[in-house]
Amino acid sequence: MRAYEAVQAARSNRRPTAKTYIDRMIDGFIELHGDRRFGDDHAVIAGIGLLEGAPVTVIGIEKGSTTDEKIYRNFGQANPEGYRKALRQIKLAEKFHRPILCLVDTAGAYPGLGAEERGQGEAIAENMYELSTVRTPVLSIIVGEGGSGGALALAVADEVWMLEDAYYSVISPEGAASILWKDSTQAERAAECLKLTATDLKSLGVIERIIPTTDLAGAHMDALRAAVASKLREKQALDTYDLLEERYQRFRKMGGDFQ
């Protein structure tokens, strides 16, 4: 799959959303609302449930499926209160020794005036800072779009996985084309330059696993649930010092072959 084809696939209206994965993978999910500072951001779903019988905290960026849902979810573009809601659940997971599963699908954090006034950049940076040292396992999966800091705020993890037809990039291809060539129609060319596909990112050491998307309704979802549960059990068995050291070294070695 070419880079811009992956971008288009990640944006498809027929694509399963974060809520789809939660419904199919997590038993007894209880959604928890609000950041206890400003309000409840509907672009972020956060709560607790059971993954193969074990408690887990799940945080997902939700786009919605219908037009009304997309408007309600702000098209998956989170405000600062969404990231602060996520952080509240991250800290609760740490307190109760629950592993964390993040499901990322966003074109980017919401760039509106209100979001900037309420500290959008600071909220994203705080999540990244706290996730780097949270004393419980974190697994993030890019299930659709992985756009800029809006995605990175939930992708500082022990491992990052991607669906084979997702993308993960510092900027959208259209945005990059507008900056580099003053022409957004050069998006396909920009996508190739950005190395944003799962294959590209796996080769660069940015992600650890590529997830096939051949059967989202059946065997694929069962296999994904089993793989996630196994990885979280593996990470949870580690001593806290070893867990944090492995996370630290994961980021230290990124790009090592290109220095």
Image (tube, helix red, strand yellow):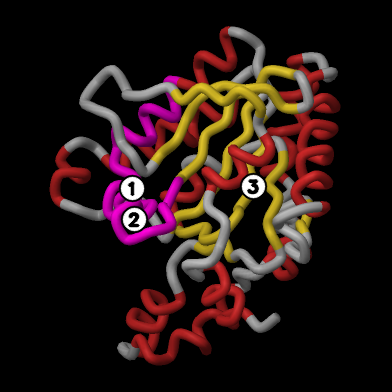
One can see residue 259 in this view:
no
Gap between marks 3 and 1 measured at Cα: 19 Å
Q: Is mark 2 on a helix, strand or loop?
A: helix
Q: Is mark 1 on a helix, strand or loop?
A: loop
Going 44% across and 66% down the picture, which residue do you hit? 171
Mark 3 or mark 1: name the one nearer the start of the chain. Answer: 1
- The answer to whether 255 is drawn above or below residue 55 in the figure is below
Going 68% across and 37% down the picture, which residue do you hit? 25
| Residue pointed to by mark 2 | 70
Query: Which is more toward the observer, 30 or 121?
Result: 30
- The picture places residue 139, in percent across and down from the top left corner, at 67, 37
Q: Main secondary structure of the magenta part?
A: helix
| Residue pointed to by mark 3 | 141
- The picture places residue 255, in percent across and down from the top left corner, at 70, 58
Going 74% across and 37% down the picture, which residue do you hit? 249
Do the CB atoms of the residues marked 1 and 2 lie less than 8 Å apart?
Answer: yes
The three-letter code of the residue at mark 3 reads Ile
